[in-house]
Image: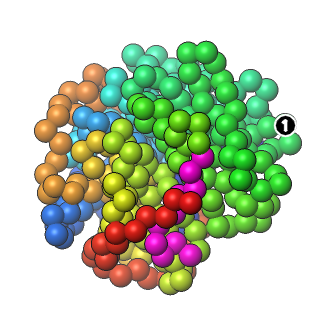
Amino acid sequence: MRFVISKAQLVFCIALLSAFSFAQGPTAASTTAGITFTKVDVPGAISTAPTGISNSGTIVGQVQDASGVFHGFLADQNGVVIGTFDFPGAARTLPNGINEKGDIVGSYANEDGIPHGFILRNGSFKTSDFPGAAATIPLDINDYGVVAGIYDDAQLFSHGYILDQTGFHTIDDPAQGSLPSTELFAINSKGDILGDFAPDLFGEFHGAFLLSHGEFLPFTVPGATQGIFAMGLSDSDDIAGSFVGDDFVQHGFLERQGEVISFDFPGSLATAPLQINTSRHIVGIYADQAVNTRGFLITFDGKGSTSTGVDAASSILGPAVSSDRLTVCGSVQATSSIGIGAVQKQICRQ
């Protein structure tokens, strides 16, 4: 059975060695070549994972409190936390995506630990499970309300799925290995889908793809020799994610119209973008020098969104409530460089 996991844990595993003091709100870390890196930390949290961002800049994410309970949170376009929320009666709540209408998707679990999908719409939660699945994890929702995600079948193999007005549909990349392993991470309002698969049961190099007009297009970036996690997809088909090269360090990247920009959150050990909006604003997580997981917001114009993200977030949650904490597990193998990486003009879609 798949354990309940967050979108962050699908791509970024950091061993939390100890607790440290944390920022009480967003802090601009640095600006490099027109790129502004901003920390997004829930006050008092062990760590914070922003997982989705709408086109108006409203951010959704996950925190875990000191007792180990996961909660959802919302923040405005500047990374200021509006409040937290939970699926009613659930032992943990893990939101993953948000659209322009304020609809939120994610997973929740009761004490048995089995992941169930949810949709939060107009302030009301609804369970959304793939029929007959052993586990369901919705990861994104577009502005038309179409959901993309992952489910486990009875044999506990992973499949991608979409949920539209006609119901649930399985989507598996034909290029996956002999065992089903397709995962769908993002869907934009044109219906394009970003996902990946493992080539075999023990395969660590994920095969990323863009599904557009019914065609699976293999996707990678220069230097991704040890693996790629293409996680975020905008309505403009900008792609954000992370890759691991021969240095065994996880770096962030942005691909836009064939141009690839690689980057690392300043001073970080690893960087993992999780979603991007039409303004090229990216949310994700990084590991600091103390091997703690932190959240970030990156803007490529040096400015925050001019849209009313605060109002949108407030309308979803109502009055702000207390915030909590997040923990992510795993290990980091090496230290990344600081600052912006080389701009590369080649993108590999074979």
- Chief SS of the magenta region: loop
Q: Name the residue at 50% across, 26% down.
A: 146
| Location of residue 338 with respect to 156 vertically, above or below | below
Residue 264 in picture, x, y percent from top left: 35, 71
Split into 4 quadrants, where in the image is the C terminus?
A: bottom right
Q: Residues within 10 Å of mark 1 (few under 14, many from 20)?
A: few
Front in this rendered view, residue 214 or 62: 214
Q: Is residue 35 magenta?
A: no
In this rendering, position of residue 180 left or right of residue 259: right
Residue 8 in picture, x, y percent from top left: 51, 53
| Location of residue 206 with respect to 49 vertically, above or below | below
- Residue 324 seen anywhere in this rendered image of the structure: no
Highlighted magenta segment, given as a residue range = 216-225
Q: Farthest residue toward the right?
A: 155
Q: Amino acid at mark 1?
A: Ala
Q: Name the residue at 74% across, 40% down.
A: 152
- Asked which quadrant contains residue 19, the reply is bottom left
In this rendering, position of residue 240 left or right of residue 161: left
Front in this rendered view, residue 220 or 233: 220
Residue 263 in picture, x, y percent from top left: 33, 70
Split into 4 quadrants, where in the image is the N terminus?
A: top right
Q: Name the residue at 53% across, 29% down.
A: 147
Q: Name the residue at 33% across, 42% down.
A: 236
Name the residue tied to disc 1.
154
Task: Give the structural element (helix, strand or loop) at label 1.
Answer: loop
